[in-house]
Structure formats: structure tokens, C-alpha cells
Amino acid sequence: MPEQVAARFSDAALRYEQAARIQQQAAVCFDDWLAQLPLAAPNHIVEIGCGTGLLTRLLHARYQNALLYATDLAPAMLDFCRKSLPADTHLQFSLCDGRSAQFDPTPDWIVSTMCFQWFDPLPPVLARHADQCRVLAFSILLDGSFSDWRAAHQRAGIEPGLRPLPDYDALLQACANLGGKRVHAQRLTLTDLHADGRAFARSLRAIGADWPRVGHRPTNLRPVLRQLRDGVAANYEIGMLCVEM
Ligand SMILES: C[S@@+](CC[C@H](N)C(=O)[O-])C[C@H]1O[C@@H](n2cnc3c(N)ncnc32)[C@H](O)[C@@H]1O
């Protein structure tokens, strides 16, 4: 399973940034949000699921004196990320599974954007990372996203192939349960317009994020696509969470 996820994202690496409009906006919002929180500046940051480096480049520009350790499961993603940044002794890259990684030395911050929705179950992963940093901060795709697509499926009596996404309130509770000093959280909605249902489905495939839910069997989508001929406003519900340990 991790191999298949890695292969899917690796296949997408070269075309990722042309298609990842929302991930780009999410990285900017997350970096800005993090910067205005009352946190001590980090000396050492680990990023999990860095992908092609949308957030990595922002962190590198903002925290120039910090050691920045970018990690991902997909070799081609990590390779793209490495090549998108200048040679700098403050930068390190490593392939690793962000669900089980143990970092040595432990960093000040562990951060991630638009990756933790792939981790199921997520709470044990949060607990593992919270134990090895001062600040655990991430943005994540939430339940309630892609409502046009889901509603069209419901009207057609078809269960969507999308994977289940975390619920915001449950996530807040999971963060509070980590026993840190403070939890900061904010929600935002970003919208991506697509010409039709097919274009929306293609956009997920283009970034390697079309991995279906467990048990999904491909089905005839014509009744769904017929309803979405005039366009899809794909809503991305995003949570930004930061736990100070
Ligand atoms: C939607 S992309 C987001 C990438 C980047 N953070 C961004 O915002 O553009 C999700 C990334 O998570 C990585 N990923 C998925 N499962 C992972 C895992 N178990 N460990 C580390 N990275 C993982 C994928 O390879 C992919 O690069």
C-alpha cells in the first residue's frame, strides 16, 4: 500500500505543479498563518510529505537560518523538491514514511501541508510526532470537500470513490488530546473551478491524489458526469492546526 501511494505520487511529480493550484494556495496560506502565530523561531524544521516543495521553498525563504529537513514517501516528488531549491547546507532531503518516521536529532517543528489526510488512522501519527517536537503544525483536507461531486453521486445513487476525509471537530479533539500547552486552529475554503466533472476527476489524477477508498469498485460515472456538464466548483475545505507541546 505505501509502495502504491508512493508510485502514484511519483508518477505525478513532473506535472504536479501545473495542476496543484489549490495546494499552492494552501501552502501560502499555511506558511502565512504559521508565521503570525506567537511561536519561537525554529532552528530545525522537519517537513513531512514535502511533495515537489511548494511549502519547502516558502519555509526556506522565511527561516533562512534554520536547518530544514524535507521528507516524502515518493522518490520522484522528493527529487523534484531537491532540484527546485538551491544547494544550501541548511537543506536536507530524505525518503521516509511520514507515518512512522522517528527523527534524530529531534526537530523544533514538524510541519506538513495537504498530506496528513492520507494517514489513516491519523491520531497515533499525531501522537508519535508530538512526542518528538516542540511544535506540530499541519494543513489538511477535511470532510465536506468536493460537495458538488459528492451531491451528484448521491443524486445518481452511486457511492463516490473518494477516500473518507477527517472531520474538523474530531481533529481538534485529537490535537487537544496530545496534551500540549496550546492548540491553534483555523479553517478555510478554497475553490477550484473546472469545466466539467471529467476535468475535476482529471485534476485529482494529475496530482496523484485519485487513490480510491478501500473497497471501491470502478463504476459507470456517466449519470454523475451528465449532471456536471456545466462545470464544477470544487470546494477544498482545509484545516490548519498547530499544537505547541
Ligand atoms: C497532495 S501531495 C502534497 C505535497 C506538498 N506538501 C504540497 O502541498 O504540494 C501529498 C504528498 O504526500 C506524500 N505522501 C503520501 N503518503 C506519505 C507517507 N506515508 N509519508 C510521507 N509522504 C507521504 C506524497 O508522496 C505527496 O508528495
Image (tube, helix red, strand yellow):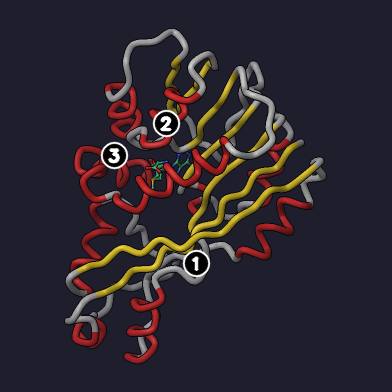
Q: What is the C-alpha distance between the residues marked 3 and 2?
A: 22 Å
Of the two numbered discs 1 and 2 in the rendering, the one whose residue sits closer to the viewer: 2
- Side (left or right) of 213 relative to 44: left
- Side (left or right) of 21 relative to 175: left
Judge the density around disc 1: few (<14), some (14-19), many (≥20) Cα neighbours within 10 Å: some
Q: Are marks 1 and 2 in contact (CB under 8 Å)?
A: no
Q: Is residue 27 above or below residue 223?
A: above
On the image, the x and y values in percent for residue 53 come to: 36, 32
**Residue pictured at 71% horizontal, 30% vertical:** 134
On the image, the x and y values in percent for residue 205 come to: 25, 57
- Queried on whether the Cβ of the residue with tag 3 lies below 8 angstroms from ligand 1, the answer reads yes
- Which residue corresponds to mark 1? 164
Amino acid type of disc 1? Pro
Q: Nearer the viewer, residue 17 or 206?
A: 17
Q: Nearer the viewer, residue 165 or 108?
A: 108
Amino acid type of disc 3? Ser
Q: Is residue 60 above or below residue 7?
A: above
**Residue pictured at 33% horizontal, 84% vertical:** 152
Q: Which mark is residue 58?
A: 2
Judge the density around disc 3: few (<14), some (14-19), many (≥20) Cα neighbours within 10 Å: many
Q: Nearer the viewer, residue 113 or 40?
A: 40
- Side (left or right) of 74 relative to 125: left
Q: Residue furthest top?
A: 89
Judge the density around disc 2: few (<14), some (14-19), many (≥20) Cα neighbours within 10 Å: some
Q: Which mark is residue 10?
A: 3
**Residue pictured at 61% horizontal, 41% vertical:** 137
Q: Is residue 139 above or below residue 244?
A: below
Q: Is residue 155 above or below residue 146?
A: below
